[in-house]
């Protein structure tokens, strides 16, 4: 009786999930469809499928040094930010999860308050500071600015995971005669690789899509792809096809990151306290 009543609900849930997936994939499909058309076809008659598909828009991205350098600049500062955030957050989260010291909770809360502040608050200080020390218009400038937000988030995520690892693991390694560096790098970090995968995902996503700091702290040399996409107006008007092709290319790195950390994401979201 119960299973008979449950089947209609299960079927409805499946169709609801299918509809939601279609709703999510529709903008991506439309973006890819526009990227495969010329401006004349885009502004012409409406069609569900590209009438005259072409790869000219993607070729323009790779052939044009402005677009290509912008894509490379984005990858540079995103990778830098992710590496710095992980290298700083992993030992910091370990300290917060294992030790108690004067002001530890207050310091932890202060880290989170930095994450709560909008990026616009830090625009002027960062701009003046980086201009004074010669970091303006470099990928490192954007990476360090993003660390103000990704490091607290990383520490918070990792501390939640590491607090769930029994302290007996530390004691067993000490009894076995392992040095702290051996224990930390060969035992503790691999145990928390799921947490690091989740953290890497969030760091990459924040830095990849952030626009305000990336636009303000760069000029002509280190201009990222998200900034270049806002400046596609030419004398002939807006280049819809090239803009769509750039949008498709900006989605691909995120898909690649999710693919490589997918197992860690599933495990991390199941065990960690990510919200």
Image (tube, helix red, strand yellow):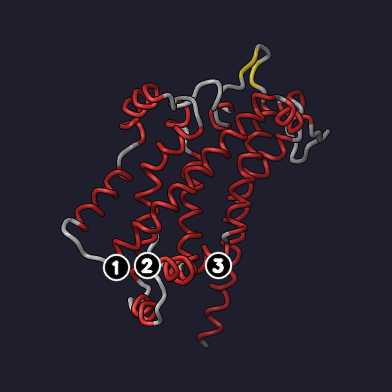
Give the secondary structure at mark 3.
Answer: helix
- Residue 251 in the image, given as x and y percentages of width and height: 61, 43
79 on left or right of 54: left
Q: Considering only order in the chain, which callout, 1 or 2, is on the residue closer to the N terminus? A: 1
Q: Residues within 10 Å of mark 3 (few under 14, many from 20)?
A: few
Residue receiving disc 2: 162
Q: Residue 133 sits in which quadrant? A: top left
Identified at 53% across, 65% down, the residue is 264
Q: CA distance from mark 3 to mark 2?
A: 36 Å
On residue 98, which mark appears?
1
User: Vertical placement of 115 versus 9: above or below?
Assistant: above
Q: Taking the image as drawn, is residue 268 in sight?
A: no
Q: CA distance from mark 1 to mark 3?
A: 43 Å
The one of 120 and 242 positioned closer to us in this rendering: 120
- Residue 5 in the image, given as x and y percentages of width and height: 53, 80
Toward the top, the furthest residue is: 235
**Mark closer to the observer (1, 3):** 1
The one of 193 and 170 positioned closer to us in this rendering: 170
Mark 2–mark 1 CB contact (< 8 Å) = yes
**Mark closer to the observer (2, 1):** 1
- Residue 92 in the image, given as x and y percentages of width and height: 34, 56
Residue receiving disc 3: 13
User: Vertical placement of 29 versus 226: above or below?
Assistant: below
On residue 252, which mark appears?
none
């Amino acid at each position: 009786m119960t299973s008979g009543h449950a089947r209609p609900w299960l079927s409805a849930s499946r169709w609801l999930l299918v509809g939601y997936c279609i709703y999510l994939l529709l903008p991506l499909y439309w973006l890819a469809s526009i990227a495969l058309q010329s401006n004349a076809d885009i502004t012409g008659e409406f069609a569900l499928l590209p009438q005259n598909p072409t790869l000219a828009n993607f070729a323009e991205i790779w052939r044009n040094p402005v677009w290509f350098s912008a894509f490379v600049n984005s990858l540079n500062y995103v990778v830098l930010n992710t590496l710095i955030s992980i290298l700083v957050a992993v030992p910091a989260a370990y300290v917060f999860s294992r030790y108690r010291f004067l002001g530890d909770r207050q310091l932890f809360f202060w880290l989170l308050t930095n994450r709560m502040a909008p990026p616009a608050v830090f625009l002027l200080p960062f701009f003046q500071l980086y201009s004074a020390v010669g970091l303006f218009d470099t990928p490192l400038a954007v990476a360090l600015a993003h660390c103000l937000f990704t490091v607290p988030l990383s520490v918070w995520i990792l501390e939640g995971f590491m607090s769930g690892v029994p302290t007996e693991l530390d004691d067993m390694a000490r009894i076995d005669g392992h040095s702290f560096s051996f224990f930390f790098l060969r035992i503790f970090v691999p145990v928390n690789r799921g947490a690091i995968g989740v953290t890497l995902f969030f760091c990459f996503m924040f830095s990849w899509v952030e626009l305000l700091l990336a636009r303000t702290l760069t000029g002509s040399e280190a201009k990222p792809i998200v900034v270049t996409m806002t400046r596609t107006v030419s004398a002939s008007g807006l280049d819809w096809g090239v803009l769509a092709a750039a949008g498709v290319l900006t989605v691909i790195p995120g898909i690649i990151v999710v693919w490589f950390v997918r197992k860690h994401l599933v495990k991390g979201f199941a065990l960690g306290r990510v919200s």
